[in-house]
Image (tube, helix red, strand yellow):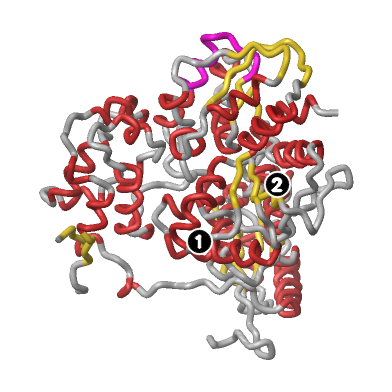
Amino acid sequence: MPKGKTQSNFEPKIVVFACNWCSYPAADSAGINRMQYPSNVRIIRTMCMGRVNPSHVLKALELGADGVLVSGCHFEDCHYGFGARNAAEQYKKLEKVVRMLGFEKERIRQEFISAAEFPKFVQVVREMVDQIKKLGPTPIKPEIVPKSEQKILEDVAITS
Amino acid sequence: MSDKIQLDRKKIQETNAYSCLECGKCTGVCPVSRYSKTFSPRQTLIRTLRNTHPESLKDANVWRCLTCQQCDTICPANIKYVEFTQMIRQFVGVENREGTCSHGGILESILKIMTSPDLKQQRLDWLTKDYQTSQSSEYLYFMGCLPYYDVLFTEIGVQSLNIARSMIKILNYFDIQPQIMSNEKCCGHDFYWNGDMKNFKKLAQANLEQINTLGIKYIITACAECYRTLKIDYPLQMGSQSFEVIHITEFLAEKLKEKNLHLKTDKMKLTYHDPCRLGRHMGIYDSPRLALSHLTGIQYQEMAHHHKRAICCGVTSWMNCSQISKQIQHARLNEAQAIEVDTMVTACPKCQIHFKCALQDKEFGEHIKFQIKDFTEIFAEQLP
């Protein structure tokens, strides 16, 4: 069994999509202000949370993420005007699909965190880690084929 | 480096590929070739077989085929090009795929997540008391991925669950309370045609295990792709099965004829679009037309291309939706517009999604005056 997958010392892996203008600076200032938050999150910076398509979140879940957080600016602060609203709309679709697939609804979360709200960012991450620790590991067991076993097209040939 | 991976020649021989006469008829009828300067089924086949162009396997053309079987029906040498393509894809491997999955890959992710045995889906929220189902019927209604399509494609005006509702309404009308699986997986059609046999078998296994516990005699489906996969690919890949697979068009044609039932409808002009999986793959052309003839008040007219020559809806297994797909869809919709119908009926949920997506083009959408409806919807509307 891989490390961290037993129930007792389970450390969830959480993917965070953070927007370049609000949530990413918030995470940054949390660090500058020496506020500690769990190291379970892997932050991916995007230009806007509207860019985060439902397919990105599902891809993370498909590859074995225990939880996904999508964060960005408040509606009024969105750098692009419409991005955060778009994201909220897409998130509704995503919620339905994720629920239909049979995941617990706590596995995904959307938060609007402005650049100044770094305590909120820390709090959201803490809450999410706690919640997912309660839920346990994701039921998905991704099979990752090692590079050495992958087919390389140069080696392919038709012979009798 | 690993040893060269070899494709068995015997397997290719089964598809008759070596008997290619290079007549080029396949390229002539191929809907992709019509709009693409580089795609040619004949060229792909010849290059792959002769080994003179080793790069041809890496080519995107292997992945651009719609597998609509237009070429197979015209080939004088009886080559099963579609099966050949499937084999080559399987051989090249889905990880080396030269194609993009439309919709950001969301549908592929959904299917991959479905292969996980520990997840229990919540897909029956839409089912209300009006729609009667039971635990002991001989019939199983296999609905496919409709609940997911309903969420993803509402914004282009597709209500896929209407098909499921209509379907149960029709079955109830004929005193059948079908069984429904609460954790039904996708049939695996998309994985199969992308050459991803590992995931296809996972889904098929999960479905068959569930089906075998239900004690049913018939599986009835409203999806042309599920129909083909359950009827042909499951027995071939997973061994023989104890149930019979029926498409709703067959079911309705038989029942309506048997009871000599005529349903009253408003006056409208109607045409039927043959989905490639139902028509060319399975040879079902007459039952949908026969069933439609039992609607009084309908004036039925064929489009310029029909039966064997029906044009495909442009995309298969959510792969490579492009300018070419749009042109194919426009051509098909224009054909229906040319005969000035009120409604175009299709028997595959995906055809409906693809055509309605083409109508999103504002200028083109205004030019098209008719509705696009599913086969089941047309009948369910007339039932009490």
Per the rendering, the mark at residue B240 is 1
Pointer 2 residue: A77
Is A46 situated left or right of B343 in this image?
left
Per the rendering, the mark at residue B137 is none
B99 or B190: which is nearer to us?
B190
- Identity of the amino acid at label 1? Ser
B39 or B311: which is nearer to us?
B311
- Depicted B91 relative to depicted B33: above or below: below
Residue B369: quarter of image: top right
Q: How many marks?
A: 2
Q: Which residues are magenta?
A: B330-343
Residue A25: quarter of image: bottom right
Considering the numbered disc 2 on the image, is that residue within a helix, a strand or a loop? helix
Q: Would residue A112 be visible to someone looking at this image? A: no
Q: Main secondary structure of the magenta part?
A: helix
Q: Residues within 10 Å of mark 1 (few under 14, many from 20)?
A: few
In the image, residue B235 lies in the stretch drawn in magenta: no
- Depicted B3 relative to depicted B207: above or below: below
Residue B95: percent from left, percent from top: 37, 60
- Depicted B192 relative to depicted B227: above or below: below
Instruction: Name which residue lies at 65% across and 33% down.
Output: B254
Residue B212: percent from left, percent from top: 64, 65
Residue B250: percent from left, percent from top: 61, 36
